[in-house]
Image: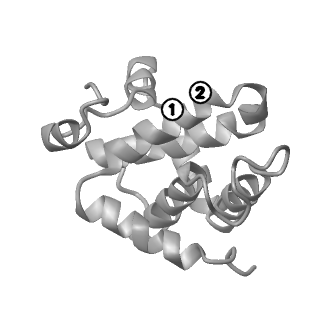
Amino acid sequence: MAAPLNFSRYLHLAQAFLARGRLPALLLAVTRKASKGGLRMRPLQDDLKLMRALCVAWWRGDYRELDRQTLLAVMAALVYFITPVDAVPDWVLMLGLLDDLAVLGWVLRRWRNELDAFRDWYAVQPQSSQLVLQQLPELPERVVAENPTVSS
């Protein structure tokens, strides 16, 4: 199964987010966009929650049973999701989210085994741990200083 068009560009962006410690900022942006989408976002909600929980668990050091390529692919899909001008700009009515769905679906299929392993791990965690993984990690102070509209 071939990667979506220009996906390698988003892999590079994901690497930059990770190298700069900006994963919490990425997750905040994903959460904001998902919450603004209303009914249009309903098909994505469970998948976004899974990907977000995976990133939070990795960030906290709770779950490291995935290879770097899987983490970067998930992050790249999330970067693609928050990018308003991608293959089909988000402002194009009824079509703007289709490419986002396609990219997220491709990542979910391509890395199904790794994501299923995380889903299984997550399911056996205590409820309190699951709640922590559903929350956004704290943003580093330098991220908050660079973006005064972000509050931690």
Outermost residue to the bottom: 2
**Label 2, on which residue?**
35
At 44% across and 65% down in the image, what residue appears? 72
Determine whether, in the image, residue 146 is placed left or right of residue 13: left
* Residue 34 drawn at (x, y percent): 60, 34
Residue 147 makes an appearance in the image: yes
In the rendered structure, which amino acid carries the disc numbered 2? Answer: Ser
Residue 32 shows which numbered tag? 1
Residue 91 shows which numbered tag? none
Position of 130 relative to 140 (above/below): above
* Residue 58 drawn at (x, y percent): 35, 49
Determine whether, in the image, residue 136 is placed left or right of residue 44: left
Choose between 24 and 51: the one closer to the eye: 24
* Residue 53 drawn at (x, y percent): 47, 39
Q: CA distance from mark 2 to mark 1?
A: 5 Å
Position of 137 relative to 70 (above/below): above
Quadrant placement of the C terminus: top left
Position of 73 relative to 54 (above/below): below
At 40% across and 57% down in the image, what residue appears? 65
* The quarter of the displayed image where residue 100 is located: bottom right
Q: Are circles 2 and 1 on residues that touch, CB within 8 Å?
A: yes
Secondary element at tag 2: helix
Quadrant placement of the N terminus: bottom right
In the rendered structure, which amino acid carries the disc numbered 1? Answer: Arg
**Crowd around label 1: few <14 · some 14–19 · many ≥20 (10 Å):** few
Choose between 42 and 125: the one closer to the eye: 42
